[in-house]
C-alpha cells in the first residue's frame, strides 16, 4: 500500500462502516447515485498540485480502551514537530441529557415518550474507556481535505464537528471547481454511548435535498428526497455523517456489529470491522494511525485515522476503476491547528 510503511495483521474482512466517509465523498463526486453529482474535471483542466507538507503538534491521545489491540507504531522523528498542551478533559454529559434535544418537526408527538429510550443493542454498556473517549473528545474539530480525482484536483471538503451541553452538530461542505456547493448536516445528542442522531439534511446550493428524521419515541425513521418514506428505526442507528464520529468514539465497541445507517435517500445495515494500526508517511512525518479498509465489487477503500488525535480521519483513498484520494491539509482541535499544509512560497517580484 502506498505511503504505508508498517501495518498490523488485518482483522476479519467485510464492508467497513468507517469507510463511509470515503463513500460519502464518492457520492458527492457523482460516482454513486445516492447523492447529488459533482462534475469532474477533464484531463488538463486541473492546476498543478503542490506537495503536501505539515507541522504536527501532538495532543493528548484519546482513550485506546475502545480500540482492538494492534501492533504499536513508533513514529519517526518529524521535521519541526513540537509539543502542545494536551486537550482539556470535559465531563461526559449525563445520559438523561439525551432527551434535551427532540426533533423539532415532531416535538409534540415524541416529547412525552422520549424520557425512556430503548437501550442500543449495537453497543455494550459504556465502559470506562468509552466514558474517557467522550469526555476528552474536543468540543470543536475541523478537518479540511484536498479531494483528488486521479491526479486532478476535484475540490475541497471541510468536515466540522461541534458539541455542547450534550448535543452535537456535524457539517460537511464540499466546494467543487465545477458545481454548486454541497452541504450535509447531522444534529443530535451525545452521551457516554456516543452519538444519537435526531436529524440529517443535505443541500445543493440553497435547495434542500435528501433528509432523515429520527423519531426515537416511536422507533420510526422518516427519510427521503422529494417524497417522505418511513422505516423501522433500530437502536443504535446512525446517519452517514454521525457514523464517522460514532466510530471515532466507539470503534472497539462496534467491531463485528452491524449498524443501521441512512444516507437520507436509502436505509441499509452496515457491518463494521477494523484492520489494525499503520504508520502513514505524510510530508516527512511518520504518523501513527489506525488503518481500516473495505473491498467490494473490485473497489478498495482505505482510511487512515489519527491514532493520537481522537481518531479523526486523515486520509481516505478509494481505488478501482477510478481513484479518489482525500488528504487532510488542515486539522484543528478546539481552535488549535495541529496539522496544516503551508502556503507555497512566492518568488520575489521579477523572478
Image (tube, rainbow, N blue to C red):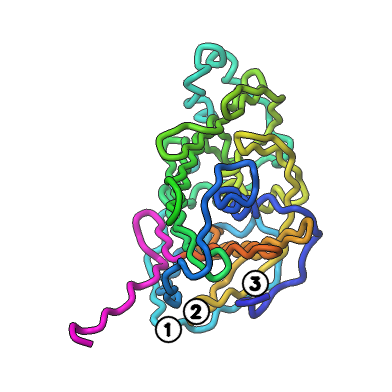
Precedes in sequence: disc 2 or disc 3: 3
Label 3, on which residue?
Answer: 278
Q: Position of residue 233 (x, y in %)?
A: 68, 27
The magenta region covers: 329-351
* Any part of residue 89 in sight: no
Q: Is residue 309 above or below residue 44?
A: above
Q: Residue 121: give its label.
A: none
Q: Considering the image in quadrants, where does the C terminus appear?
A: bottom left
The quadrant holding residue 335 is bottom left
Q: Position of residue 116 (x, y in %)?
A: 62, 21
Label 1, on which residue?
Answer: 79
Q: Position of residue 29 (x, y in %)?
A: 56, 52
Could you give the CA–CA distance between mark 1 and mark 2, rounded to whole angstroms?
Answer: 7 Å
Magenta stretch encompasses residue 238: no
Looking at the image, residue 165 sits to the left or right of residue 71; the answer is left
Q: Is residue 26 above or below residue 126?
A: below
Residue at the image point whose x is 59% and y is 49% from the top: 30
Precedes in sequence: disc 1 or disc 2: 1
Label 2, on which residue?
Answer: 285
User: Which element is circle 1 on?
Assistant: loop
Do labels 1 and 3 touch, CB within 8 Å? no
Do labels 1 and 2 touch, CB within 8 Å? yes
Magenta stretch encompasses residue 346: yes
Precedes in sequence: disc 1 or disc 3: 1
Looking at the image, residue 257 sits to the left or right of residue 280; the answer is right
Do labels 2 and 3 touch, CB within 8 Å? no
Q: Considering the image in quadrants, where does the N terminus appear?
A: bottom right
Amino acid at each position: 500500500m502506498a505511503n504505508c510503511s508498517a501495518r498490523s495483521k488485518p482483522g476479519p474482512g467485510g464492508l467497513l462502516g468507517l469507510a463511509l466517509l470515503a463513500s460519502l465523498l464518492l457520492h458527492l463526486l457523482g460516482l454513486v447515485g445516492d447523492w447529488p453529482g459533482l462534475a469532474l474535471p477533464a484531463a488538463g483542466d486541473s492546476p498543478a498540485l503542490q506537495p503536501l507538507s505539515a507541522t504536527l503538534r501532538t495532543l493528548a491521545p484519546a482513550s485506546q480502551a475502545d480500540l482492538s489491540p494492534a501492533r504499536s507504531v513508533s513514529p519517526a522523528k518529524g521535521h519541526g514537530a513540537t509539543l502542545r498542551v494536551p486537550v482539556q478533559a470535559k465531563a461526559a454529559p449525563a445520559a438523561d441529557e439525551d432527551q434535551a434535544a427532540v426533533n423539532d418537526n415532531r416535538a409534540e408527538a415524541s416529547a412525552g415518550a422520549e424520557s425512556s429510550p430503548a437501550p442500543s443493542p449495537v453497543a455494550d454498556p459504556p465502559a470506562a474507556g468509552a466514558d474517557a473517549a467522550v469526555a476528552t473528545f474536543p468540543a470543536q474539530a475541523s478537518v479540511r481535505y484536498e479531494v483528488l480525482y486521479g491526479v486532478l484536483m476535484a475540490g475541497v471538503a471541510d468536515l466540522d464537528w461541534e458539541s455542547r451541553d450534550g448535543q452535537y452538530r456535524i457539517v460537511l461542505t464540499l466546494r467543487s471547481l465545477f458545481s454548486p456547493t454541497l452541504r450535509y448536516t447531522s444534529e443530535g445528542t451525545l452521551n457516554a454511548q456516543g452519538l444519537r442522531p435526531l436529524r440529517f439534511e443535505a443541500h445543493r446550493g440553497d435547495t434542500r435535498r435528501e433528509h432523515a428524521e429520527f423519531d426515537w419515541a416511536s422507533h420510526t425513521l422518516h427519510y427521503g428526497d422529494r417524497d417522505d418514506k418511513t422505516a423501522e428505526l433500530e437502536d443504535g442507528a446512525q446517519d452517514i455523517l454521525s457514523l464517522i464520529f460514532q466510530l471515532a468514539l466507539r470503534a472497539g465497541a462496534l467491531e463485528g456489529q452491524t449498524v443501521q445507517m441512512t444516507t437520507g435517500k436509502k436505509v441499509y445495515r452496515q457491518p463494521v470491522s477494523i484492520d489494525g494500526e499503520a504508520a502513514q508517511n505524510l510530508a516527512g512525518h511518520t504518523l501513527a494511525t489506525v488503518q481500516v479498509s473495505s473491498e467490494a465489487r473490485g473497489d478498495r477503500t482505505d482510511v487512515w485515522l489519527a491514532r493520537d488525535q481522537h481518531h479523526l480521519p486523515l486520509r481516505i483513498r478509494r481505488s478501482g476503476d477510478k481513484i479518489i484520494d482525500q488528504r487532510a491539509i488542515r486539522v484543528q482541535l478546539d481552535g488549535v491547528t495541529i496539522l496544516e499544509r503551508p502556503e507555497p512560497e512566492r518568488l520575489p517580484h521579477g523572478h
